[in-house]
Image (cartoon, grey):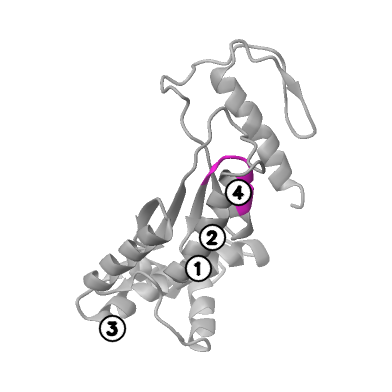
Amino acid sequence: ARQKRDLALEAAEQIANMMVMDPYPGYEGEGFSMPCRNVLPKPLQKPPPPMWIACTNRSTIEVAARNGLGALAFSFLDPDEAKRWADVYYDIIRSEECVPLTHVVNANIAMVAPFSLHHDPDQAVDRGIHGFRFFNYAMGALVTQDNRPGRTTLWADYMAQAKAKPLSRRAPGIGTPADFGALVRDYEAAGIDQVIFLQQGGLNRHEHICESLQ
């Protein structure tokens, strides 16, 4: 696990070379190797399609900037935090620290923004908050716990811990349509280039399956 980032970047650089080099001269590295060959088909898009890196933690945004990659980030707590990271990203992009991993710099920050909207903000929270909180809980549990498909009661486990952790503040993107419009405009002003709207559905199905298993 400690090596996965370096190995992923090593392979990504070679894949980018395969998109444009004719023939690809070959490579022998720590985690990736390929003999000399012409890799087909080549992308029709010129320059080749931009490359992104998923930024599951904030420090990866700096990695994206140093490698000239687009940063695909999860939502920030508020526009002020978004501005701090956008400033860090573009300061590095403009500096000599940015050494493109690919053949073209993709200077972009795209943010995945959850949304659950209703004209009654309490309804928006009731209908949306557990879908997003359960998603985050389940993703962590798949890494940290010994889960057995069809036997592990993730939903019941989630609800038990959720009741002990009441919401202390509203989640960005969960509220009224007017609130969400203002939030997106604030993110634009903070320097976020793209917003990807995420609706986490299927909550009733999760609950039904877990009840059936119990």
Q: Which SS class for mark 4? A: helix
Query: In the rendered image, which residue does mark 3 sit on?
Result: 122
Answer few, some or many: residues within 10 Å of disc 2's Cα (few below 14, many 20 plus, some between 14 and 19): many
Q: Could you tell me the amino acid type at mark 1?
A: Glu
Q: Residue furthest right?
A: 30
Residue nearest the observer in this picture, 69 or 33? 69
* In the depicted structure, whether residue 29 falls above or below residue 25: below
* In the depicted structure, whether residue 154 falls above or below residue 120: above
Q: Could you tell me the amino acid type at mark 2?
A: Trp
Q: Residue 182 appears in which quarter of the rendering?
A: bottom left
Q: Which SS class for mark 2? A: helix
- Reading the chain from its start, which is encountered first: label 2 or label 3? 2
Query: In the rendered image, which residue does mark 4 sit on?
Result: 92
Q: Is residue 66 magenta?
A: yes
Q: Position of residue 132 (x, y in %)?
A: 43, 69
Q: Nearer the viewer, mark 1 or mark 3?
A: 1
Is 130 displayed left or right of 126 in the figure? right
- Reading the chain from its start, which is encountered first: label 4 or label 2? 2
Residue drawn 54% across the image and 83% down it: 161
- Reading the chain from its start, which is encountered first: label 3 or label 4? 4
